[in-house]
């Protein structure tokens, strides 16, 4: 029988094996492993796909946010607003710069930043907001942009989980996530919706000055070799990764649609189980299902996880501890508002296998196991 995995990267590779192998061999044969021609080709292709003016390719999604914060001139002591329920990278780079992550809660239905709390945590030190488009669905960008303009704050969208998703404004205008704020960032970690075969990341912006500055920061702050205008770092996307991503970018819409089909199959089979909530797609956003995450209504999430594991079904908890409960952030993060939804979700969410190779048969097996758990 097919071994069920959280993410099946090998079967996905097998479908495009020849194209990928050729792309990698192309790099091996020209030998320009750093800043080879595939890197700028990929940046241009990605900019076209997202409909954004500029893309800065970087080494990973964490440094993408770090370079974005540096590009905005964030200083030690500055405050940056982030959701408490996110992957650590979002808050980590703020703290790494000596700035202060100011945590706000998330909504239980969208898992995204509670925009109703943002204004109440703004102080004279607040410089930016980093909404995270969690699990594949946009945060409420219309209201976030309105608040940011009112208080003159920058917006960095952490789009590591939602590349290809869209947000639909009240006037009907649609925009890809990551291109709405001042800066957007993403990750090409292998399991992300557009994943390389190693680490990778990118930054997007429509602002030319920010683009020029961030591109320099990611390359030792230099605009000319050995002449350093800014304090920077070495954060580059490898040519081999760019060559792989160039191939995979052609398939991103197909990959997204396979994830959406899998989500639809899960929904059809899980919607009537009263002990869980299935993911909600809000009507002003599309969902690209980086994760398919259910929320349990009772306190037996860990028992369900074990029950499924015993039946060969891997699941994952994104994330078991919100930022303010992490040891390293006890003294660093500011927590001016209640974070009860983040705490609740950390105990009640469970992400099911989600990737481009899921079949009806696998989803039947997984959903039947969930159903039988609640019938016990
Ligand atoms: C994966 C991820 C990152 C970091 O990306 P890396 O490439 O692993 O550094 C940042 N934010 C979120 C929300 C992520 O899911």
Image (cartoon, rainbow, N blue to C red):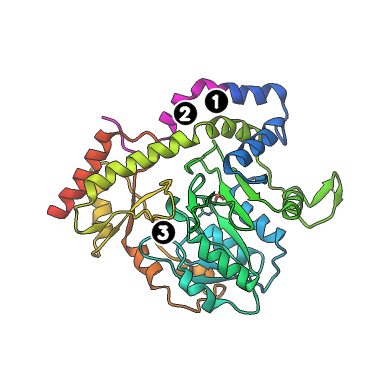
Callouts 2 and 1 close, C-beta under 8 Å: yes
- Queried on whether the Cβ of the residue with tag 3 lies below 8 angstroms from ligand 1, the answer reads no
> Which comes before the other along the chain, label 3 or label 2?
2
Which residue corresponds to mark 2?
A: 13
Q: CA distance from mark 3 to mark 1?
A: 33 Å
Foreground pick, 315 / 249: 249
What residue is at 49 percent from the left and 44 percent from the top? 192
* Residue 219 locus on image (x, y percent): 75, 47
Which residue corresponds to mark 3?
A: 319
Disc 2 packing (10 Å; few <14; some 14–19; many ≥20): some
Give yes or no for residue 5 being in the magenta stretch. Answer: yes
How many discs appear? 3
Highlighted magenta segment, given as a residue range: 1-21
Which residue corresponds to mark 1?
A: 20
Q: Which quarter of the figure is the N terminus placed in?
A: top left
Foreground pick, 174 / 27: 174
* Mark linked to residue 176: none
When asked about the image quadrant of residue 7, the answer is top left
């Amino acid at each position: 029988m097919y071994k069920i995995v959280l993410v099946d990267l090998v079967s996905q590779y097998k479908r495009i094996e020849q194209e990928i192998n050729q792309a990698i061999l192309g790099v091996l044969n020209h030998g320009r492993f750093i800043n080879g021609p595939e890197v700028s080709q990929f940046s241009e292709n990605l900019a076209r796909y997202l409909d954004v003016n500029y893309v800065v390719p970087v080494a990973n999604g964490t440094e993408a946010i770090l370079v974005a914060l540096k590009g905005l001139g964030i200083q030690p002591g500055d405050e940056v607003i982030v959701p408490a329920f996110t992957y650590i990278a979002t808050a980590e780079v703020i703290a790494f710069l000596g700035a202060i992550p100011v945590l706000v809660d998330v909504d239980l239905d969208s898992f995204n930043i509670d925009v109703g709390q943002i204004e109440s945590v703004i102080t004279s030190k607040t410089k930016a907001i980093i909404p995270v488009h969690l699990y594949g669905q946009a945060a409420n960008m219309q209201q976030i942009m309105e608040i940011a303009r009112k208080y003159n704050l920058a917006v960095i969208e952490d789009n590591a989980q939602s590349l290809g998703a869209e947000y639909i404004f009240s006037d009907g205008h649609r925009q890809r996530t990551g291109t709405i704020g001042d800066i957007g960032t993403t990750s090409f970690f292998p399991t992300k919706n557009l994943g390389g075969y190693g680490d990778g990341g990118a930054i997007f912006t429509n602002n030319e000055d920010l683009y020029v500055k961030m591109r320099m920061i990611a390359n030792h702050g230099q605009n000319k070799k050995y002449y350093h205008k800014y304090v920077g770092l070495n954060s580059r996307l490898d040519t081999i990764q760019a060559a792989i991503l160039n191939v995979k970018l052609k398939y991103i819409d197909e990959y997204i649609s396979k994830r959406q089909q899998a989500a639809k199959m899960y929904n059809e089979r899980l919607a009537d189980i009263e002990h869980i909530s299935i993911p909600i797609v809000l009507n002003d956003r599309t969902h690209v299902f980086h994760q398919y995450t259910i929320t349990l209504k009772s306190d037996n999430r860990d028992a369900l996880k074990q029950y499924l594991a015993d039946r060969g079904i891997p699941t994952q908890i994104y994330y078991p501890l919100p930022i303010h409960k992490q040891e390293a952030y006890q003294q660093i993060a500011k927590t001016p508002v209640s974070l009860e939804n983040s705490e609740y979700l950390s105990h009640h969410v469970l992400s099911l296998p989600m990737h481009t190779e899921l079949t009806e048969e696998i989803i039947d097996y997984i959903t039947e196991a969930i159903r039988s758990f609640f019938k016990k």
